[in-house]
Amino acid sequence: AQRVTQPEKLLSVFKGAPVELKCNYSYSGSPELFWYVQYSRQRLQLLLRHISRESIKGFTADLNKGETSFHLKKPFAQEEDSAMYYCALAYSGAGSYQLTFGKGTKLSVIP
Amino acid sequence: DVKVTQSSRYLVKRTGEKVFLECVQDMDHENMFWYRQDPGLGLRLIYFSYDVKMKEKGDIPEGYSVSREKKERFSLILESASTNQTSMYLCASSDWGAGNQPQHFGDGTRLSIL
């Protein structure tokens, strides 16, 4: 069965420090991975997906199939990055693709 | 821009009541999903639907049912509400296609069962 693990419930960093949110997955198929973010009092929204290979709000994530990881990184944290971050894996099920989410990491950027 | 609208932001019901949560999307998406979001547990899939009148169980379907009579609307039903169903409920939709299609979420309904 597919699984997504985010080992840190809470991560606190100082403004300007590098950030790395860890995500490991377990899946027998070809993985499609996403990072979603939920800012305070806002809806859950897509931050980035591995297939796009893009940088969004300064964040990047590289799929490492050897280590089965998809860590989210940003070189210099900003206060507005404080939010809840979820890593998600798409898997093929009945009729469509579904997402399995990790339990989330709350990022707190200290001014 | 995709719009997923959940009918209520906050809802308070009593134990044993039948509760309806409504979700509407405006992008003609085939797939719709219901999750519950609990602190420390992340998002857990309750039910999903990949077509009108089609429904599939997710990871935690017990105590819930769903209805999809029209493509744009997906309803979650708590047949007999219990206190352990107090939670934040999120609806999402996605387009048909490969696994890299993102899901778009509504604002959520915070449901309290007294």
Image (cartoon, rainbow, N blue to C red):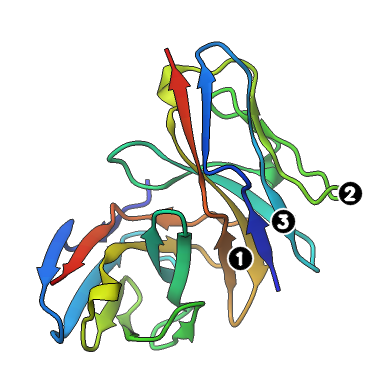
Q: Nearer the viewer, mark 2 or mark 1?
A: 2
- The reply to whether label 1 and label 3 mark residues of one chain is no
Q: Callout 3 environment at 10 Å: few (<14), some (14 to 19), or many (20+)?
A: many
Q: Is residue A36 visible?
A: yes
Instruction: Look at label 2 and name its amino acid.
Output: Gly
Q: Are marks 2 and 1 on the same chain?
A: no
Chain for disc number 3: A
Check the picture and name the quadrant holding the N terminus of chain A.
Answer: bottom right
In x, y percent, where is residue A36? 51, 45
Front-most of residues A102 and A37 = A102
- Disc sitting over residue B97 in the figure: 1
Q: Are marks 2 and 3 on the same chain?
A: yes
Query: Which of the 4 image quarters holds residue B113?
Result: bottom left
Q: Which mark is residue A103?
A: none
Query: Which element is circle 3 on?
Result: strand
Residue A60 placement: quadrant: top right
CA separation in Å, label 2 and label 1? 27 Å
The reply, left or right, for residue A87 in relation to residue B30 is right
Residue situated in front as seen by the camera: A10 or B22 = A10
Q: Position of residue B71 (x, y in %)?
A: 35, 76
Could one spot residue B98 in this view of the protein? no
Q: Which residue is mark 3?
A: A25
In the picture of the structure, the residue carrying the numbered disc 2 is: A66
Q: Position of residue B92 (x, y in %)?
A: 40, 62
